[in-house]
Amino acid sequence: MLWELSSDVWTHIVARHPKISHLLSHVEETLRDADEVRRSRKRHETVLYYKHFAMLRLGHGVVRNKYVCVVADHSEREIKTAYLTARLKQGATLWRKD
């Protein structure tokens, strides 16, 4: 599935989650090759894509054992936000990589 990520949305994401600013390629990789995809518990049309990274370089620093989470609206085919997290949110698992 193709997703739209406008520059306005990316600016909004980076403003709310500054650590993700160096990780646009990881956001794209998460959408292409997610480890797990879950449906939001709050909004049926919202899907969360997760990919685990053992190490991520963030400007001058490094974080370990984090997931990149990309939140997308399937009905609008738009990315809503993206952020780093240590664990997956609850929600129905739609797909999991073996």
Image: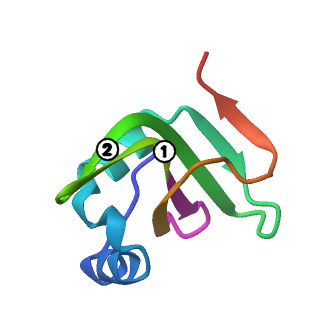
Q: Quadrant of residue 45?
A: bottom right
Query: Mark 2 falls on what kind of element?
Result: strand
Q: Amino acid at mark 1?
A: Lys
Residue at 34% of width from left, 73% of height from top?
A: 18
Vertical position of residue 91 compared to residue 73: above or below? above
Percent across and percent down for residue 47 are 64, 56
Q: Is residue 57 above or below residue 70?
A: above
Label count reads: 2
Instruction: Check the image and report above or below for 23 versus 55.
Output: below
Labels 2 & 1 near each other (Cβ < 8 A): yes
Residue positioned 59% across, 23% down in the render: 97
Q: Which residue is under mark 1?
A: 66
The quadrant the C terminus occupies is: top right
Q: Nearer the viewer, residue 74 or 48?
A: 48
Crowd band around label 2 with a 10 angstrom C-alpha radius: few (<14), some (14–19), many (20+): some
State the residue in front, 27 or 55: 55
Kindly identify the residue that appears in the image at 81 percent across and 69 percent down. Answer: 42
Q: Amino acid at mark 2?
A: Leu
> Magenta residues: mostly which secondary structure?
strand
